Amino acid sequence: MKEISPRLFIGNDCDCVNVGPDWAVVHACKTCHQKRVGYRGSLPASHPNYLIYEEGFHLYLNLVDMEREFLPKFTHPIMQVAFRFLGSHHKKHNVLVHCNQGYSRSPAIGLLWLARQNSIRNYATWHQQSAI
């Protein structure tokens, strides 16, 4: 588990089971989503928790690494809820964002959150400043 900013950590499946009850956790992996929602294989797209399931300090996202680009009809609602969840918990609690290995989905969500909070420069800002 790596702390990428105060109270914001990026990790993997092992880290997910080792945090205390006062932590908020974004589970950015299908395996945790499957366990919590209670299904195997794929969930029908019509299911109310097809993309997202939230329970207390835990947000479960139905995300997998894919060779092809994620479609906005999936990424937009997932990221909206993830940003809302981070915004409501980050100032009061340690927050872990994890995926299976901690190398792709969780760092991407963490970096997008930091850019959105202006904690790191985003490309557009950097590009405008470097052109001056």
Image (cartoon, rainbow, N blue to C red):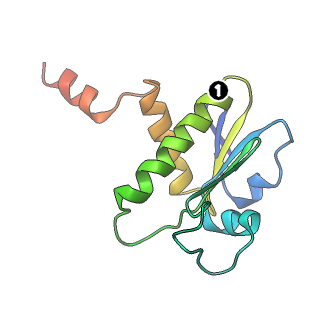
Q: Which residue shows up at 59% across the image and 67% down it?
A: 47
Q: Which residue shows up at 63% across the image and 63% down it?
A: 100
User: How far across and how far down the image is residue 48, in percent?
Assistant: 60, 61
Q: Is residue 97 left or right of residue 70?
A: right
Above or below residue 39? Residue 17 is above
User: How far across and how far down the image is residue 41, in percent?
Assistant: 63, 81
Furthest residue toward top: 132
Q: Nearer the viewer, residue 29 or 130?
A: 29
- SS at circle 1: loop
Q: Which residue shows up at 54% across the image and 43% down it?
A: 81
Q: Nearer the viewer, residue 55 or 101?
A: 55
Question: Which residue type carries mark 1?
Answer: Pro
Q: Nearer the viewer, residue 71 or 21?
A: 71
The part of the image, by quadrant, that contains residue 25 is top right
Q: Mark 1 = which residue?
A: 6
Number of residues whose C-alpha sits closer than 10 Å to that of mark 1, classed few (under 14), some (14–19) or many (20 or more):
few
Q: Which residue shows up at 77% across the image and 42% down it?
A: 56
Which image quadrant: the C terminus? top left
Above or below residue 37? Residue 127 is above
User: How far across and how far down the image is residue 80, in percent?
Assistant: 48, 42
